[in-house]
Image (spheres, rainbow, N blue to C red):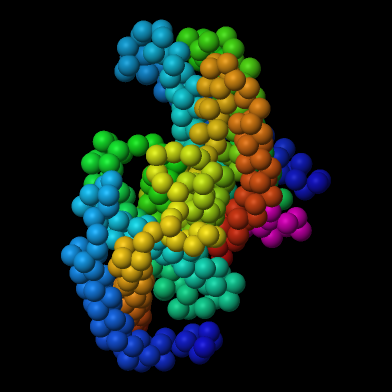
Amino acid sequence: MFHRFANPTRFLRFAAVIQPWIAAITVALIGSGLYLGLFNSPADYQQGETVRIMYVHVPSAWMALFCYSAMAGACAIALIWKHPLAELSAKATAPIGAGFTFLALVTGSLWGKPMWGTWWVWDARLTSMLVLLFLYLGYMALNNAFDDPARGAKSSSILALVGFVNVPIIKFSVDWWNTLHQPASVVKMTGPAIHASMLTPLLLMGVGFTTYYLWVMLIRIRYEVTANKIRTLQRRQAATGESQA
Amino acid sequence: MNGFLQIVRRDLHLAMRQGMDSLMVVAFFVIAVVLFPFGVGPESSILARIAPGVIWVAALLSSMLSLERLFQADYEDGSLELLALQPVALEITVMAKVTVHWLTTGLPLIVAAPLLAVLMNLPDDGFVPLMIALALGTPALSLIGTIGAALILGSRRGGILLSLLVLPLYIPVLIFGVSAVDAVIGGFSARPQLLILSGLLVAALPLCPWAGAAAVRQGIE
């Protein structure tokens, strides 16, 4: 499986087949999750209707960490096995992850204003999420900073692995430092501390965001492969043009 | 070990001969801190409150400013490739570069810090923890920054890119460096913060030269 898809053509064929299915699953999951979350789940006894922000905020925060872990994993694979698709998928993941991080910060801020009375606090989790956003931006900037895309991919892979130290810090920040942000209530040793009527739409949205990520990543990888082909063709054309002239 | 010392000696010679680099870093450090009393007003209680943070942020920025030159000169004239070819592990070479960077920037910063602390009206209790925290923190800054300096070799707009890569990774050192000083001024022990700073340094010591060497290899490939 792993080495089978080292061949971009084979991967593209496979991607073209599964992409519409993933798109359909994503629309169904996010659609049903949004319906259940916005219209068919109880308002919180303390937070009222604002609790519905959770159905976007929590999955995007999960995805922010998930995307970075996936990116770091892909970068490790790219550095160790020189797997051509690993580099492309890491590059494709970065903007999606940055988008999810940004979404988590913005929805958190919108949720914080009515609940905590402030848009922003310098809480451990908020701060470490902000650092995560900078790590994504640094990765993308470094990836684009070289004339040779292969060199940019390698350098930014090292950076992604160095920045991975931040991920466990974010995950456990709410347990290590007792601050304003509440601790984890879904993934716990004692089982989720949240009622099924809220948990169902939350999990639907979580899985929906994951399939959305896969969907967009496939689109971006196909774009990257095509862009590489165009670049090669242009270079070849320029080379033959020179030799004729 | 011999190879390590020879590279340290060579780079120190180069730094002494060509120059003003180290002095410029200290000058930047002093000017950056001196800007704050103009910015927030000369009221001594406010200055005393923000002194540890201002000194740390300025130290961090000055340490970062000189990073770009760490490999750049050797990369441009090709000697970095020769350094990589010699029978000394590239990690050792990178470690030697880090040592020289700390000797030429971190150490002068530590020496200049008490003077700035006086200017910023830092309470007397804060001096010792500030010095200890800087002594533990600036080597960690040099180590972390080396990765960034190696990654940007051969890129466009290296300097500004370097700050985007390195500053997020500097944040833990900044947090614990400042809170060590604040703890002592507030009447607590700085022991936990200083232990965490030492932990960061000890973790960075083997990992950063390793990652830095990997980045240099990509750069000269």
Main secondary structure type of the part rendered in magenta: helix
* Residue B157 image point, x, y percent: 38, 49
Magenta residues, start to end: B80-91
* Residue B134 is covered by the magenta coloring: no
* Residue B86 is covered by the magenta coloring: yes
Left or right of B75? Residue A100 is left
Residue B58 visible within the image? yes
Q: Is residue B218 above or below residue B83?
A: below
Which one is in front, B96 or A47?
A: A47
* Residue B121 image point, x, y percent: 48, 9
Residue B158 visible within the image? no
From the image, which quarter does the C terminus of chain A lie in?
Answer: bottom left
* Residue B80 image point, x, y percent: 61, 53
Q: Is residue A91 above or below residue A1?
A: above
Looking at this view, name the residue that lies furthest to the left. Answer: A39
Residue sitting at x 64%, y 46%: B204
Residue sitting at x 32%, y 91%: A17
* Residue B13 image point, x, y percent: 67, 34
Q: Is residue A44 above or below residue B197?
A: below
Residue sitting at x 75%, y 45%: B4
Looking at this view, name the residue that lies furthest to the front. Answer: A45
Which one is in front, B188 or A102?
A: B188
Residue sitting at x 46%, y 56%: B154
Looking at this view, name the residue that lies furthest to the right. Answer: B2
